Image (tube, rainbow, N blue to C red):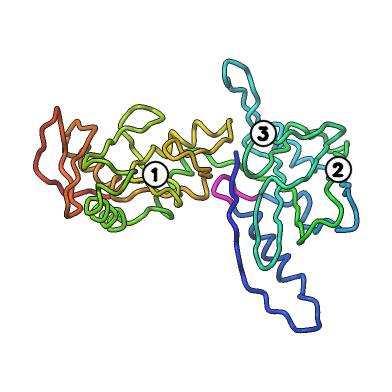
Amino acid sequence: MAESHTAFAPVFHSVPGKRTPMEPIRSYVSNLLKTSHMYDFICYLVPVIILPQKQQAKRFNIKLTLEQANSLALSRDIVIVNGELESKFWTKVVFRVCKAENGRFVVDLPLHLSIKINGQVVIRDQEGPLELTKYFKFNPELPNTLIIEYPKYTTGMIFVSILLVKALSCESMVNNLIVTRTRSKDYTKQKIIKMLENENNDVTFMSSELSLICPLSQTVMEFPCQGISCSHLKCFDAFTYLSLNDFSGKWICPLCKKTTLPSSLVIDGYLAGVINTLKTSNLSCSTVALLKDGSWQPKNNGEQKEVLESDPIAVL
């Protein structure tokens, strides 16, 4: 899986004529890199370090403990992806990178870094954290040699680390979204009111009807979500989105095609309430009519029914 391109801008006070203390910055980056919506942090295999600017390569010899090697080896599942058998690990080794420049901290961008592990070139085929698990030897007696190559005199500071993590299931990630990242009903309600007032000028909202069908599963959504930077009203199902991107690592919004990583997903509280209300009322409906006051009515075979109050979303 993959995670974030998010830029962060904490303030570290500096004294004129003196270098900014590195420990607060390193501590901040350390917490930043071990935090994820996709996994639970276990430990650092390589703690956060800064790549030396005057060099062009950094070498690490990583020896797993017996417990770490067993945890990796025993977490392997064999799954079918695009008709082929592939290994999926629930305990993973991931590489994370953070570039700090001008007070901004940008995580997991595809910087010009080349990585080799035990002589194999690591291919970056996903957004976000780079998974290294399949390149590692799960033998506590054998070191894993990792070499990072990078351009000389790169601007800013590049922090890197290698982590051992426990992957979260899609169910756990959806529950975390519901608990910590559910957008209020009022936010979407006000958005609907504004869109209906300016309907003729808004290319993303051309009618007062809204489909409840997920564009990925083609079924009624259960956990409607979108990216925090998405401007459209339509949503897609969070569980379906996370499941489909688990292996592809593409993380592209199916509606606006923006990069939408798990860390930027939000549950739409308004639509979640609509869907739960229809479910508890035993109403089969795939489209709702939106009214100018921000309320809604179920539509079935072109007929509108009475306005209903929305129920809150339930955790899995």
- Residue 125's label in the rendered image is 3
Residue at 80% across / 40% down in the picture? 115
Q: State the CA–CA distance, disc 3 to disc 1.
A: 25 Å
Q: Residue furthest right?
A: 55
- Badge 2 crowding class, 10 Å Cα cut-off, few under 14, some 14 to 19, many 20 or more, is some
Q: Which residue is mark 2?
A: 147
Point out the image quarter for the C terminus. top left
Residue flagged by tag 3: what amino acid is it? Asp
Residue 167 position in % (x across, y down)? 59, 41
Q: State the CA–CA distance, disc 1 to disc 2.
A: 39 Å
For label 2, the SS is: strand
Q: Which residue is mark 1?
A: 225
Residue 40 belongs to magenta span = yes
Residue flagged by tag 1: what amino acid is it? Cys
For label 3, the SS is: loop
- Badge 3 crowding class, 10 Å Cα cut-off, few under 14, some 14 to 19, many 20 or more, is few
Specify whether 161 is left or right of 119. left
